[in-house]
Image (cartoon, grey):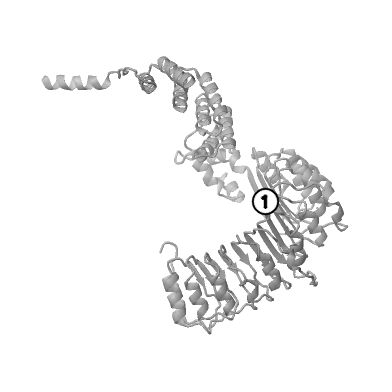
């Protein structure tokens, strides 16, 4: 009996309410308020927390959280929401006030209001809870359509957001097939607008046409389509444009239209309707001319940041540089790619680039304008340019241009790609690199006029990747000096060169960060097995790949030693 009495006294001491301590400071008052809260005395707790926050300013965040919890437990959910909104005004970047308000609305099955709270959080916050907020938004999306938020789907095996993420990784054809698996799968997939907000219709077969009924069906299923890609040759372009207007695709952020035939007037009318939020636009085809597109974009797509135009004509007349200042600027364009533009001249290109003050990345592929006029244009335009890629069209005319030393490009470019030009000389490359101290990537493949003088006059301290494929004018001493002057080098391509010798391998062995070397199509008659072995032994801790494809005069012994000593994955 004595043991039972002792146990009962211990249990009673554990379960009885905790008595608040005597208060001698504000912290004591805070602890007393917490005691009242955990003892379910919510009215007294709320009054104490309110006084601590508004009168004394003690632990404002914690006091506010306890006040909201007191409101919820007392059933005053409207006052709890008002308190959350008040705190959102004071601390707009704190995500937990948005999440608490969303949870309150979710408990009351008001999923639209709950989703709106999380949507505001994604616009104003970027803290550690961002991924959780996005996950909860997807779950609430189902609640908005079905009237209930389920924590699992597909036979109760996976949470809703994980199921969405799995199906989101499928292409459009595979996703359509999944709707035929079962009635439960079809209900889940068809009713989920999140899975259909990115639509891809790609087909390179000329004889196959895009069925308009299919396009209408998918656009009707997608609640808030954000990306549409149509790559069909000789399809009904006007029908596609009318479908975009019919289903109110005004929230598009990416639009890709390639190889379609459409009416220019209809294209610009629809672009005026769907282009208000457009961030990325890609056009390819002969229906719309380059100059017409450039002249209309500032008025139609005021938030456009990425523009890609390929395989189209410029205009019926040459561009007039005199009127450039009168034309509206493409203020928000940061990435521009022109690929295979027929009839492109230096004046056309200047007319475009002089109107892009915020341009960061420029890509010119199959360009009819030679590299020297392009560099001359870039000297007076695009002050924020950091990434430049150029590839000459093989049908472009080779003309003689003069380059003056005082016309150097004084910009800090990070990435430069100038491939397969027959006019790039040592002086041009030297002038190009003289002020580019932050260069990390350099690709000069196919420039056969370059010699050692192009790259050895100044150290490339920040260079991480360089490609010298088919640069036959650079000899072994030049390659060795380039490696020695690039202490951060990670990737180097020496493909198709015949000057590779032991000294180059010994220089590469001292590159502490080297990850990849390309010796494909090289002649290694002047390289010994000892040099290759020394290179592999020194760099096997960092080197991930060494390419010897179609290399001549390479012994089997050296190839086997390289393969067995380089890591593959985690092994």
Is residue 538 shown above or below 66? below
Q: Residue at x 53, y 23 (%)?
A: 81
Looking at the image, the residue that sits furthest to the front is 406
> In this view of the protein, can residue 377 be seen by the observer?
yes
Q: Position of residue 45 (x, y in %)?
A: 41, 18
Q: Nearer the viewer, residue 489 or 343?
A: 489
In the shown orientation, is residue 379 left or right of residue 25? right
Q: Nearer the viewer, residue 256 or 147?
A: 256
Quarter of the figure that contains the N terminus: top left
- Give the quarter of the image for residue 213: top right
Looking at the image, the residue that sits furthest to the right is 317
In the shown orientation, is residue 9 left or right of residue 489? left
Is residue 90 shown above or below 178? above
Q: Residue at x 52, y 68 (%)?
A: 516
Q: According to the image, label 1 marks what residue?
A: 201
Q: Residue at x 70, y 51 (%)?
A: 230
């Amino acid at each position: 009996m004595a043991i039972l009495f002792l146990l009962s006294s211990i249990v009673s001491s554990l379960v009885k309410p905790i008595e608040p301590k005597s208060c001698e400071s504000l912290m004591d008052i805070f602890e007393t308020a917490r005691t009242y809260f955990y003892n379910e005395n919510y009215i007294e707790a709320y009054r104490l927390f309110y006084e601590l926050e508004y009168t004394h300013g003690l632990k404002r965040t914690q006091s506010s959280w306890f006040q909201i919890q007191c409101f919820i437990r007392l059933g005053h959910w409207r006052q709890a929401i008002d308190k959350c909104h008040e705190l959102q005004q004071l601390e707009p970047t704190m995500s937990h006030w948005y999440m608490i308000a969303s949870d309150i609305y979710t408990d009351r099955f008001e999923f639209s209001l709950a989703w709106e709270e999380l949507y505001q959080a994604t616009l104003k916050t970027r803290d550690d809870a961002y991924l959780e907020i996005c996950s909860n938004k997807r779950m609430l999306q189902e609640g908005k359509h079905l009237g209930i938020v389920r924590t699992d789907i597909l036979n109760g095996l996976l949470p809703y957001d994980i199921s969405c993420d799995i199906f989101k990784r499928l292409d459009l054809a595979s996703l359509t097939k999944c709707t035929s698996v079962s009635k439960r799968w079809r209900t889940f997939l068809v009713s989920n607008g999140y899975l259909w907000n990115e639509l891809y219709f790609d087909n390179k077969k000329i004889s196959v046409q895009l069925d308009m009924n299919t396009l209408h069906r998918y656009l009707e299923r997608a609640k808030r389509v954000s990306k549409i890609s149509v790559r069909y040759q000789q399809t009904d372009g006007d029908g596609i444009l009318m479908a975009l207007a019919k289903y109110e695709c005004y929230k598009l952020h990416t639009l890709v239209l390639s190889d379609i035939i459409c009416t220019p007037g209809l294209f610009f009318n629809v672009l005026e309707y769907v282009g208000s939020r457009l961030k990325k636009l890609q056009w390819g085809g002969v229906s719309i001319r380059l100059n017409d597109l450039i002249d209309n974009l500032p008025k139609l797509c005021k938030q456009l940041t990425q523009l890609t135009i390929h395989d189209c004509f410029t205009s019926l007349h040459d561009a007039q540089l005199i009127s450039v200042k009168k034309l509206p600027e493409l203020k928000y364009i940061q990435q521009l790619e022109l690929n295979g533009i027929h009839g492109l001249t230096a004046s056309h290109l200047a007319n475009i680039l002089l109107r892009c003050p915020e341009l960061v990345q420029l890509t010119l592929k199959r360009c009819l304008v030679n590299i020297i006029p392009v560099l001359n244009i870039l000297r007076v335009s695009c002050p924020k340019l950091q990434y430049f890629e150029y590839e000459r069209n093989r049908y472009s005319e080779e003309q003689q241009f003069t380059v003056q030393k005082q016309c150097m490009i004084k910009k800090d470019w990070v990435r430069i790609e100038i491939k397969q030009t027959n006019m790039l000389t040592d002086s041009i490359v030297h002038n190009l690199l003289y002020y580019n101290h932050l260069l990390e990537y350099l690709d000069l493949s196919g420039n056969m006029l370059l010699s050692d003088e192009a790259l050895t006059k100044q150290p490339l301290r920040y260079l991480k990747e360089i490609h010298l494929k088919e640069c036959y004018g650079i000899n072994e001493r030049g390659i060795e000096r380039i490696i020695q002057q690039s202490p951060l080098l990670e990737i180097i391509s020496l493909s198709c060169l015949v000057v590779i010798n032991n000294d180059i391998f010994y220089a590469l062995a001292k590159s502490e960060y080297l990850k990849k070397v390309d010796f494909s199509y090289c002649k290694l008659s002047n390289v010994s097995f000892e040099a290759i072995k020394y290179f592999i032994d020194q760099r096997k801790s960092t080197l991930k790949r060494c390419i010897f494809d179609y290399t001549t005069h390479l012994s089997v012994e050296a190839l086997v030693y390289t393969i067995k000593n380089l890591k593959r994955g985690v092994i």
